[in-house]
């Protein structure tokens, strides 16, 4: 069985091939869904492995790489579970496990958080009548700071400016203004698109099939970038007063579960999220969605990395040192090279999946 460090692939192509091989070894039913066939590069696919009941009483979904560069981490956790399954784990009778690998293969391939249209896929799942337009209060005023129309430079005081904004207005205000999802600035950070993306349409069309007619569905969506280094938080769609919160705490641990965002939480309210769409479309009484968020570095550093990579992508010369510096820092902020980080998050991720599979039924 691979060690945790061995599970981190060097690029999307290796990760996808390893996922398919591990799924086949575990006896999974495999699907491949192309998401880019314009002839400009090899076809990129979302790969899906389904294991267990064909008529499930409950379904566990584990998705990775919705934010492309985070796929290096998510793929490692999925590989870990598949290798354990091939070795000595088993899926309980009546349970189906579905692993959705690299929801944003373009971002995974190019070390971007967004897709080929600069779309943040976790802002792209809007429910009617919400339209793909507008931006949060405060985003337009921050656009010159967040999205300068120039290549990144080593000699600019973004960190100081961001810290000044936090000191003056508070971190919750920064999160709400910047990261909630905007549909006005196509080259800007956290752009949610103007139409549903190819990946969004695919997930919308296939998710009911993957869930099957199971009366209970638990969906774990794997993410990095928020929270304390090498520690995870499980972010819920439900508010703190929901009776379901206690079930999550009993299943995954009281210390890790966070109900939906408030001023002091790890997360923030956002529009067009996969979890919000899934629960509203498939039924909140049936569908439980958990964003498994694994911390890396302080939020100002992470935001600075997103800003620099976005500027490099749009305004720097392709292949230039500025581009490589920006992508290296983005990779570090969403999948740190630290042996401690990689070892801990893989083991934590495996535990979360196993707790979901072994969870007591809800009444």
Image (cartoon, rainbow, N blue to C red):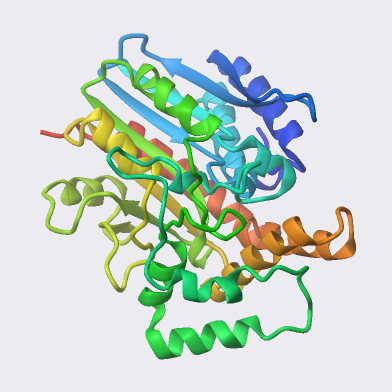
Residue at the top extreme of this rendering: 54
Where is residue 296 shown, x and y percent of the image?
56, 64
Residue at the image point whose x is 64% and y is 49% from the top: 69
Tell me where residue 78 sits by quadrant. Answer: top right
Quarter containing the C terminus: top left
Where is residue 179 shown, x and y percent of the image?
45, 63
One can see residue 89 in this view = no
Residue at the image point whose x is 65% and y is 21% from the top: 20
In this image, 156 relative to 182: left or right? right
Tell which of 326 and 290 is nearer to you.
326
Tell me where residue 298 sits by quadrant. Answer: bottom right
In this image, 107 relative to 345: left or right? right
Total numbered labels placed on residues in the image: 0
Quarter containing the N terminus: top right
One can see residue 227 in this view = yes
Residue at the image point whose x is 63% and y is 71% from the top: 304
Tell which of 196 and 299 is nearer to you.
196
Q: Is residue 16 above or below residue 304?
A: above
Tell which of 247 and 236 is nearer to you.
236
In this image, 99 relative to 39: left or right? left
Residue at the image point whose x is 62% and y is 43% from the top: 117
Q: In this view, does 330 lie above or below 158?
A: above
Where is residue 22 shown, x and y percent of the image?
63, 23
């Amino acid at each position: 069985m691979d060690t945790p460090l061995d599970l981190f692939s060097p690029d999307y192509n290796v990760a996808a091939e390893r996922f398919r091989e591990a799924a086949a070894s575990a006896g999974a039913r495999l699907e491949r869904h192309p998401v880019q066939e314009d002839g400009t590069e090899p076809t990129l696919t979302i790969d899906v492995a389904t294991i267990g009941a064909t008529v499930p009483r409950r379904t566990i979904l584990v998705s990775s790489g919705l934010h492309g560069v985070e796929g290096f981490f998510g793929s490692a956790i999925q590989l870990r579970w598949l290798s354990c399954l091939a070795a000595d784990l088993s899926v309980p009778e009546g349970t189906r496990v579905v692993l959705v690998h690299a929801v944003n293969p373009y971002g995974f391939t190019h070390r971007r958080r967004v897709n080929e249209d600069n779309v943040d896929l976790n802002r792209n799942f809007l429910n009617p009548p919400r339209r793909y337009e507008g931006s949060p209060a405060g985003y337009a005023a921050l656009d010159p700071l967040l999205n300068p129309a120039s290549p990144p430079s080593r000699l600019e005081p973004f960190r100081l400016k961001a810290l000044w904004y936090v000191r003056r207005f508070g971190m919750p205000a920064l999160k709400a203004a910047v990261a909630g999802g905007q549909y006005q600035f196509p080259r800007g950070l956290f752009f949610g698109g103007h139409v549903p993306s190819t990946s969004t349409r695919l997930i919308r069309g296939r998710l009911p099939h993957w869930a099957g007619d199971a009366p209970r569905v638990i969906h774990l969506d794997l993410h990095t970038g928020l929270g304390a280094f090498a520690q995870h938080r499980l972010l819920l769609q439900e508010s703190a007063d929901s009776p379901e919160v206690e079930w999550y705490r009993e299943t995954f641990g009281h210390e890790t579960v966070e109900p939906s965002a408030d001023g002091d939480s790890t997360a923030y309210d956002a529009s067009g999220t996969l979890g919000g769409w899934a629960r509203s479309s498939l039924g909140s009484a049936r569908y439980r969605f958990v964003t498994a968020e694994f911390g890396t570095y302080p939020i100002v550093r992470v935001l600075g990395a997103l800003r620099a990579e976005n500027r490099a992508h749009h305004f720097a010369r392709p292949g230039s040192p500025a581009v490589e510096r920006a992508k290296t820092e983005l990779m570090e902020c969403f999948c740190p090279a630290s042996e401690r980080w990689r070892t801990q998050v893989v083991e934590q991720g495996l535990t979360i999946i196993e707790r979901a599979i072994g969870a007591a039924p809800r009444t």
